[in-house]
Structures are given as structure tokens and as C-alpha cells.
Amino acid sequence: MCNASAHFLRKYLITIIFLNLCNKSIHVILKK
């Protein structure tokens, strides 16, 4: 159970970071 929650948290963090990077690149593209 502990292992599963750690895996879920890692997946969640990766998703957040990925979305954050996408947002930044979208802002850069829109500014051009």
C-alpha cells in the first residue's frame, strides 16, 4: 500500500511538472 501511494505521488508530480512546462511553452508561443 505504501509503495502504491509513492508510485501514485510520483506519477502525480510528473503530471504537474509536465503541465507546467506545457503552459510555459504555450505562453512563449502565444507571445510571438
Image: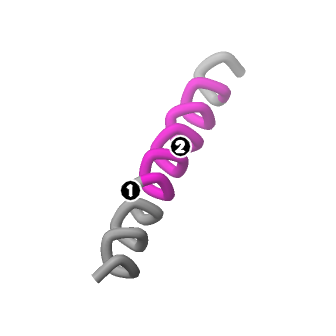
Seen as rendered, the residue at the extreme top is 2
Judge depth for marks 2 and 1 and give the one in front.
1
Say few, some or many: other residues with alpha carbon within 10 Å of mark 1 (under 14 / 14 to 19 / 20 or more): few
- At 64% from the left edge and 29% from the top edge, which residue is drawn? 4
| Residue 3 lies in quadrant | top right
Label 2 SS: helix
Q: Identify the disc placed on residue 7.
A: none
Residue beneath disc 1: 21
Determine whether 7 is above or below 17 in the image.
Answer: above
Measured as percent of width and height from the top left, residue 27 is found at 41, 69
Label 1 SS: helix
- At 39% from the left edge and 81% from the top edge, which residue is drawn? 30
- At 59% from the left edge and 42% from the top edge, which residue is drawn? 12
Taking the magenta stretch, the answer to whether it contains residue 26 is no
Measured as percent of width and height from the top left, residue 15 is found at 52, 51
**What is the magenta range?**
5-20
Residue beneath disc 2: 11
Taking the magenta stretch, the answer to whether it contains residue 15 is yes
Q: Main secondary structure of the magenta part?
A: helix
Along the viewing direction, whichever of 25 and 14 lies nearer the viewer: 25
Q: Amino acid at mark 2?
A: Lys
